[in-house]
Structures are given as structure tokens and as C-alpha cells.
Amino acid sequence: MKKTDKTTAVVNKIIPFSSVDGPGCRTAIFLQGCNINCRYCHNPETRALCSACGDCVRACPGGALQRARAAGGGLRILWDREKCLGCDTCIRICPHGASPKVRVMTPFQVMERVRRQIPFIRGISVSGGECMLYPEFLTELFTLARQEGLGTLIDSNGTIPFRDHPDLLEVSDGVMLDIKAFDSGDHERITDAPNALVLDNALFLGERGKLYEVRFVIAPHLYDCEKSTEAAGRFLRDIYRDHPFRIKLIACRPMGVRKEYADFRSPSKEYLERLREVLSRMGYREIIMI
Amino acid sequence: MRDISMERVNTTRQEILDIIKSPTLTHEQKMVCLAGKADSLLEVMDLPEGLDELLNAPIETQCICDLNEGHAPMRPRYIAPDYEKFLKNGSAFLQLEPPTDLFEALNALLIIYKHVPSITNYPVYLGQLDDLLEPYIDTVDEKTARKLIRLFLLQVDRTILDSFSHADIGPKPTRAGLYILEAEKELEDAVPNLSLKYEEGVTDDAFMLSAIDCALHSAKPSFANHLMFRRELTDRYVIASCYNGLPLGGGSYTLCRLILGNIAKRASGIEDFKTRELPRVMEIMAAYMDERIRFEVEESGFFEHNFLIREGLVERERFTAMFGLVGLAEAVNILLEKEGRKGRFGHDQAANDLGVEIMEVIDAFNQAHVNPYCEVTGGHFLLHAQVGIASDVGVTPGTRIPIGEEPEELIDQLLVLSRFHHYFPSGTGDIFPIDVTVHRNPEYVLDIIKGAFRKDLRYLSFYSSDSDVIRVTGYLVKRSEMEKLDAGNAVLQDTTALGLGASKNGKILERKVR
């Protein structure tokens, strides 16, 4: 399962009703695979694609996993949903940060799963992993979603240039963009990647009114969040004036984080409140703290 | 009046003494219980053959339940006065002139509430409060209006000691409606129960978001599908008691309920249930309800003498009755098991289909049964998905999916519910505890309500999984008050005891959080 066809995606899961992936009630679709390596990643099993090593097959207590030869000749892990106990042993022991419980799906197949939620949802949000690893898939999926009158949002780490994907932006309502640190050195220490592209994306999207939300992950144990928030706030202020967006301050929490990175304390409510205050003094209006 | 045995008299005398000595009943609660005991000694109704066995049985086998209406009903169970008329005309009996400002309007309402009877002895309907108060809202400044409304609601909670008391607002946004929501959000009290009548395109989103914000703090308002209710009951309808849709200026004479699971236990299989056992029990329950209604209308004197009738605040012709049911889930599961078929209500297509078939049988029976005193609803009773009572064990309210068996995904639950809500003009509803993160995204709840009402769901309630005020089955209680009562202390509201019973017998604290 190393490579996927351009118009399919490896889907980790679909949450029918999500309250935390954009405005209102939305179906959230999580795609598998990520191009950076955030120390505090809350779903580390979405980072890599399965290499079919078979470790999980041996460990599965329900016998729900099997290694088999795929049509193309390569090995792959088959997951039997009926036998699965939902214990997540496979995810815990995977040495690659992948999951065998994924499905390769076409945009049409995903849309079938979305349709069931109409009319309860106002849109879909695609997240990951990093969903921008599948731009053609997103373009097709969003085109189908818009035909049903649904909104379309992208949740991205911002490391893939949006200016290369005008067709996708055309069918997207906007992007929920992470700025994991304003200083590139900090960003690289947290994620293994510099942030020049992230900031470029922020301006590019912001100027076009396609920046729906900017997210700061507040992790004081990793970087100076006050300094970073203030600098990011100054950086974005000009585009905010013409095209306001929402800011989300996300308190980094140890739940789901890999053991070696999970030994930290979440920032306090007061700490978040201070950051909110900094931004609100700069004129930012809609600031959500979670 | 028929004689009763001395043994029954003596049992009742002992029960009366127990009530008098009870450490956990307040004075008012004792008075109500004593009145019930007096009434229980009467035998004045002509009861249908076969009723005794179905009615007077333990909860494991009981098939018909009259929800403690007593042996000689002296007033309709639910009364929904036309308070607008009262405010317009004043009342000769209460010696009140029509109010001229907000002070007088609120004062007049608090006075009349004391004189509106019901099964609980407290008014189960407090009026369409926003429409009632909006005309007076400019008679004082805004700050005073907010304070007066807040004090009014506080007084309602502390003196109407039963959370089956229900007020309505909506569908149009009003200042009065907004002040009510803002006050309730802060008060976090159990009384009054509150419904917002919602209609897409009429109720604006901003008003709804205030209502949802309020609901996530105080478990109210609930949301009623206005379009659906007014199609069935016209614009002159109210939501009273738990979630009962009833004609305004009238109400319901009586509410009895079928305990479907226990009826299923008597049947040999699905066909026997649908063609023999269920129809027989329905015949007997309908005859029993007819007789109760006859006594109320022809003998009790309520409809000749009560001031509400005399002043035209209710009319006999606007009363109907509620043909209730509980335990559809148990009935379906029991019948499938008897047939050796797989499937569980709420989860499998075949089980849900059987649920619909059973509802069709009940609906057809009701449409064919005629009562001469239910003119307002075409001579028929209205179906009602009853929410259960504190002593129910192993009985799921109405057509709900049992607590603990809710589908993993809310969407799956909603799609099941959408097949059943439309049968019940006199009320049904479902309740969803919501995770606190939704406090930051109230539009999530708004979208679900909009979608649900487009799918013909009737009535939805939400509360925050961490809030003190919670919805038990249809009414509200405070967790903190239940704890006091459980520790052996008397508490103000009688519904706290019902909530405590339901939390022990009905698993209401274990609903799946969404």
C-alpha cells in the first residue's frame, strides 16, 4: 500500500458528526499519512502508510488481521471489521506510526458515506495525517460535496503550497491552518520541518479569503508560546483586516501522544487566557480556546 | 358507589399514617399523597371487564397503567389555560383587572398559577411566556424587565414544586424570550420545564444559539418541531408537562399507557401479538379511558363549576385524551426472540421494521376508536410516547432505544428515531447529553436540530454532560437535590424523588454522551 492511485486516498476514519472540525456539525474525514513529525501528534497512527511488515497480524488478539498478496502483487494487511475487538493493539505496537485499519477509497465511495448524514451536517472537513498529500482526491471529493450543497474545509499543516492547487481552492470554502510555531527553528524542532511554506500559505490563503481558521498549538514545554503567538498575530494582522478568520488556541494535552513525548503538563486556562488577551488587543475578534 | 373490603380500608389507613410520619416528604407533598389515599378508597367508575388483571399487577407483568390518576378524577389530567385571554380580560373569580404593565402581568400570572389544577396539583402549563410578556416589555426599562423576569422565574421554581410545569417560547424571537433564556441560563433551576417551538426560516439562528447556550447550562429549553405540531394541532397548541402537545384552552382528560413489553410476553409470536393480544389490551385500555372521561365530563362537576371554564380560559370542547405507550423496544426484542429471529431494536433493520409494524397497528386502532368528548382531535385520542415513571424497571420510555444500547454513532440513532416520532402528536422526544466541548460550537447542536426536524423528528432535548440540572425522562431535576434526598433529607420539589427513582431503576445517568 505504498503508493495510491491519484484519485483514491487511504482513509483512516470517517467521523459522521464532528463538533471540533470547523463550524457546525460536519462529517470529518481523516486521511492516512503525514509529511512532518510533530512531537505532540495526538493520533500518531495516522502518520505513515502501512509497510505490511506483519507485526500487527501476530499481535492481534481477535485474529482480525491477515497478510495477503494484493492484486498488484505486493503484500498488504487485510483488516476484518467484524472480527476486530477495537482494542487498538495494532496501532500501539506498529513500529512505523501506521494503522492496518484503513481503507483505500475513491471520492465517490467517501461521498456515499457522507450522504447518510444529510441533512444533519452543513459540510465536510478533511483532515489527517496531512490531507494535502491527496490534492486531486480532495478536488474530486469537494466537487461532489458541493453538488450536495455541503461546505468543504481543509485541515492542513501548511507545508504543501496551496498556490500549486488552484482547482482545489476553487471548490474549497477555506483552510484551517496550523501555525505550530512562528519561529522556523522552533517549528523545525517540533515538527522536523521549517515553516517558510506555512507562513507563505497563510498569506496566500488569507489574501484570497480562504483562510477559515488559524490554529496555534500551545505547548509551552516545546517553545516560547507567548512570543510566538504575538509574532504570528502581528504577521497576520494585515490580511485579517480584509478577510477576518477565526483563531483557535489549542492547549497541547498528553492524551494519545507517543510515550516518549508525553511527559509534560498541559498549559493552564489562565495561560491560554493570557495569549487570548494578547491577540484580542491586536484586534482579533473570534478566538476560541480548547 | 361500590363497597370495598375492611382489609383494604385498613391497609390504606396504615399507608396514611406512614405518609404523615414520613421524614422525607414536605408538608405539601404529604397533603398531595393524603388526598390520593382518600381518592383510592372510592369505587365509582364502571370498569371494563378484564381490566383488573392487566392494571393491578406488578411492573413485570402489568400491561395497562393509569399513572396514578386515581379512582375518581375530579379534573382533567392536563389543563392548558388560555393565559392570553386571562391577561386581556382579567378574572372576576380572582378579582383581577387586566394588567397594564410588566409588574402587573407577572403578578397576575403568579396568582393564577396557584389556581390551575392538574394531576400533580401544580399547573402543567404556564403559558407561551414570550408572547404573553412581550406586549408589556416596554412598560419598564430593559434592566427592570430583565430583573422582573428573573425574579418571576425564581418564584416559579421555588413555589411550583414540580418540574412537570412547562412554559413555551418561540418560534419568533422576542426580547421577552431572550430575557427568559438569559435568566434561565444563570438560574440553572429545574422549574419551569421549557420548550422552544422551532421553525426553520421563522426562528432565527441567533435566537436559537442563545437557546442552545441556555440548554447546555440548564438542560432547557427543549426544541419542538413547530411545523409538525401546527400541521396536526393548528397554531393553537401548547407543549405541557414533559413534552405533551395539546390544544390550547383545553388539554387532556387522561393519560393511560400500554406496557408493550409485557403484552409481548403474553403473546406466542408476532402474529398473535399483532392480531390478538395487543388489540385486546388496547380495547380494554380505550374503554377504561372512555369511562374516566365520562366521569370527568358527566359527574365530576369540573366542567360546570371551575372558574377556568366559567371565564372561558378552557373549554370542554378543546380537551382530548392521550393514548400512551412504553416499551416498544422490549416488545420488539421479546417477539423476535420468541420467533427465534435475530435482531435488536435500534440496531437492526428487521427489528426497527417490526417496531414500525407495531406502531401501525396501534395507530390504526386509535384512528378507529371514537370518543364523543374528543371533538377537538376528530373524536380520537392522540398517541403519546410516555416517558416512564420512577418505579419502572426494564421498561424503556415510549419508542426510545434503551439506555446503554444507543448506537455508537448519533446519526444512526437519529435515523431510527425519525421512523417513530411522527406517530405522536401528543408527545414523544429524545434526550442527548452533550460533551462539554460543544460549548464552543453551539452551531453543532443547531445543525442537528435543523436536520432532525427536516427528517420529521418531533422533539429533542440536550444537556451538558457536566451540568447540575439534567433531564430525567421528560422533566428536570438537579443532581445536587437528588443527592440530598438520597441522604435522607426532605427536598423542595416532588419531582426530585421521581428523578432519584429513575436514576436507580432507569439508568438515566448512563446515557451515551454525544
Image (cartoon, rainbow, N blue to C red):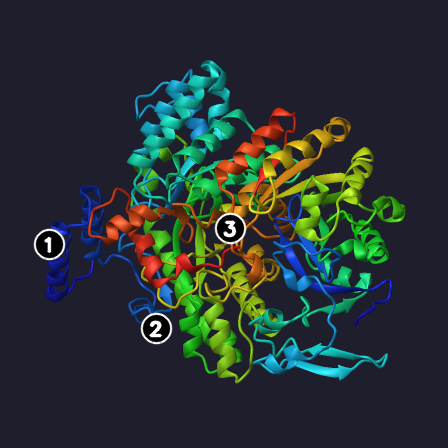
Q: As shown in the figure, which amino acid type bears the numbered disc 2?
A: Thr
Which residue corresponds to mark 2? B61
Horizontal relation, residue A196 to residue B242: left or right: right
Give yes or no for contact between labels 2 and 3 (Cβ–Cβ under 8 Å).
Answer: no
Give whichever of B111, B204 is nearer the camera.
B204
Q: Nearer the viewer, mark 3 or mark 1?
A: 3
> Along the polypeptide, which appears first: circle 3 or circle 1?
1
Give whichever of A211, B196 is nearer the camera.
A211
> From the viewer's perspective, is residue A123 above or below residue B391?
above
Tally of numbered tags = 3
Q: As shown in the figure, which amino acid type bears the numbered disc 3?
A: Ile
The residue positioned 54% from the left and 51% from the top of the image is A253
Q: How crowded is the residue under tag 1: few (<14 C-alpha within 10 Å), some, or many (20+)?
A: few
- Label 1 sits on a secondary structure element that is helix
Counting from the top left corner in percent of width and height, residue B201 is at: 67, 37
State the CA–CA distance, disc 2 to disc 1: 29 Å
The residue positioned 11% from the left and 57% from the top of the image is B13
Q: Chain of mark 2?
A: B
Counting from the top left corner in percent of width and height, residue A74 is at: 82, 79
Counting from the top left corner in percent of width and height, residue A284 is at: 65, 29
Which residue corresponds to mark 3? B434
Q: Which mark is residue A198?
A: none
State the CA–CA distance, disc 3 to disc 1: 44 Å
Q: Are marks 3 and 1 on the same chain?
A: yes
Evaluate whether residue B204 shows in this view.
no
Horizontal relation, residue B310 to residue A77: left or right: left
- Label 3 sits on a secondary structure element that is strand
Q: How crowded is the residue under tag 2: few (<14 C-alpha within 10 Å), some, or many (20+)?
A: some
> From the viewer's perspective, is residue A99 above or below residue A76?
above
State the CA–CA distance, disc 2 to disc 3: 35 Å
Please identify the quadrant where the N terminus of chain B is shown: bottom left
Q: Are marks 2 and 3 on the same chain?
A: yes
